[in-house]
Image (cartoon, rainbow, N blue to C red):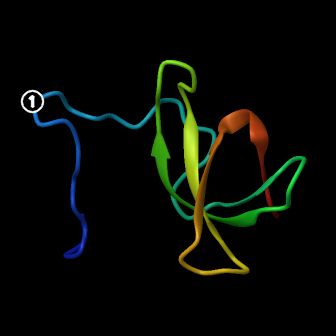
Amino acid sequence: MGQNSKVVGPQDGRQLKQPEPTTFGLGDRVRKKSGAAWQGCVVGWYSTTLTPEGYAVESEAHPGSVQIYPVAALERVA
């Protein structure tokens, strides 16, 4: 991890693990497939009971703005 990286997670000793296999990696350019437009760079991931594979995407148009989406809502940008 880089000097500014931090690992965050539950305080009860459980380890957070990136979903595997992953569809997208950190730094991949993606966009929403439908609905309101959102295009940017994958900056993180999340996993819940309802969304086993989800991604945090930072907007290219508005740096610093991040939205989270399930994998099914995203597609890779060439």
Which residue is found at the position 87% from the left and 47% from the top? 33
> Residue 19 at what x, y percent from top left?
46, 32
> Residue 29 at what x, y percent from top left?
69, 64
> Residue 20 at what x, y percent from top left?
48, 30
Reply above or below: 62 against 9.
Answer: below
Question: Which of the pair 66/25 is nearer the observer?
Answer: 66
For label 1, the crowd category at 10 Å Cα-Cα, with few meaning under 14, some 14 to 19 and many 20 or more, is few
Q: Give the structural element (helix, strand or loop) at label 1.
A: loop
> Residue 64 at what x, y percent from top left?
53, 77
Reply above or below: 30 against 5.
Answer: above
Of the 4 image quadrants, the one containing the C terminus is bottom right
**47 with respect to 3 (left or right):** right
Which residue is found at the position 9% from the left and 29% from the top? 13
Q: Quadrant of residue 77?
A: bottom right
**28 with respect to 9 (left or right):** right
**6 with respect to 18 (left or right):** left
- Furthest residue in direction right, as rendered: 34
What number of labels is visible?
Answer: 1
Which residue is found at the position 33% from the left and 34% from the top? 17
Reading the image, the residue beneath label 1 is: 13
- Furthest residue in direction top, as rendered: 49
Of the 4 image quadrants, the one containing the N terminus is bottom left
**17 with respect to 45 (left or right):** left
Reply above or below: 6 against 11.
Answer: below
What amino acid is found at the position of numbered circle 1 in the picture? Gly
Which residue is found at the position 69% from the left and 77% from the top? 60
